[in-house]
Image (tube, grey):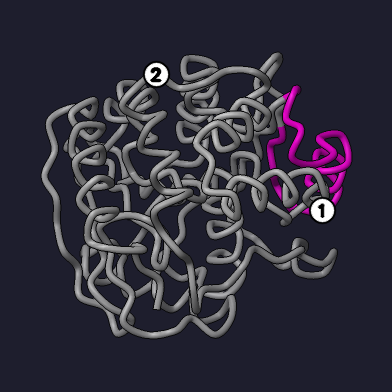
Amino acid sequence: MSGFVDDEARERFFALYDEAMRKWPQHTRLNVATSFGPAAVHRAHGGTGPPLLLLHGGNATSASWAPIMPMLTPYGTVFAVDTLGDAGASVQERPVADARQLAQWLDEVLAGLGCDRVHLVGLSYGGWMALNQALHRPGRVASVTALEPARALAPVRAAFVLRLLVARLTGSTAAAGRFLAWCRAGRLPEPPMYDLLVSAMLDHRQRAVTAPQALTDDQLRAITVPTLVLLGERSPVHDVRRAAERARRLLPGNRTEIVPEAGHGLPADSPETVGRLIRSFLGDTSLTA
């Protein structure tokens, strides 16, 4: 199963994790039992709208949503789950064989939270997860907001894979920092988030988890829930124009926007713009929840 390289790495990671989560508004942490292992979920109470569930990007943990939380909690209660198999407080006890099993895990999380209908908001890997959920387990999904969804709409550039491999195989904090700056169009998060991201990349090993997969034209057409796709104009991870074109052409009832000057890390790069777009979208879709 996925896990930390040793006890020292685990302690280093969780010290940074706890510090980074202090940037959130007041919240509680829940442990939700699933057949794949306990899921760690953070809950921040908010407005009266239907709940939101946030799905973070690879290595980013729920702490990465802190910059955008003030824009989301006025709408409704916000949940953020640490993704199964990734660095974080969720514990993987069983392999995830494919995309359908990952959707099963997330459905079990939603059931454990008592969420009959929820707005999914995901970044990168989490954006692909949100679309995957709407494809395979749509029953609890009121809407999907996919921020820079990895591989779902356009292939990941070879440079992304190469730079990530260099950082992980060398164990170099400098290479990890260069990779993060490249993804974020030259921007870097401030400590402790920067240090947490580096720790997640170098101190944790992902095993027995499902990689994001390209969604076919037919699969995208089969997603019927309201969908918002947000892409960073300066994201180097994939062909932004190609991803936007496929979303606009194939996702029924979608809204697709390219956020000016933003890189791959949309919630941190442009929190006010992204928050405004999500709130506007949720306002239009709230009656479907």
Labels 2 and 1: the sequence-earlier one: 1
- Amino acid on which disc 2 is placed: Glu
Please report the residue visible at 31 percent of the width from the left and 65 percent of the height from the top. Answer: 110
Establish if 92 lies above or below 149. below
Q: Position of residue 72 (x, y in %)?
A: 35, 29
The image quadrant that residue 106 belongs to is bottom left
105 drawn magenta = no
Pick the quarter of the image with the N terminus. bottom left
Q: Is residue 173 left or right of residue 41?
A: right
Q: Residues within 10 Å of mark 1 (few under 14, many from 20)?
A: some
Q: Position of residue 101 (x, y in %)?
A: 50, 81
Q: Which residue is mark 2?
A: 190
Q: Nearer the viewer, mark 2 or mark 1?
A: 2
| Residue 97 higher or lower than 282, as above or below | below
Give, as a single range, the part of the protein colored magenta.
233-256
Mark 1 lies on residue: 155
Q: Looking at the picture, how far across and down is residue 50, in whole percent?
A: 31, 45
Front in this rendered view, residue 190 or 117? 190
Q: Distance from label 2 to label 1 (Cα)?
A: 29 Å
Disc 1 marks which amino acid? Pro
Horizontal side, residue 94 vs residue 243: left or right: left
**Residue 257 percent across, percent down from the top left:** 71, 28
Label 2: few (<14), some or many (≥20) within 10 Å?
few
- Which secondary structure lies at badge 1? loop
Q: Please, what secondary structure does the residue beneath circle 2 have? A: loop
Q: Residue at x 46, y 54 (%)?
A: 142
Q: Residue at x 37, y 32 (%)?
A: 195
From the viewer's side, name the closer residue of 139 and 123.
123
Residue at 39%, 75% (x, y): give it.
105
Q: Does residue 238 appear left or right of residue 182 in this picture?
A: right
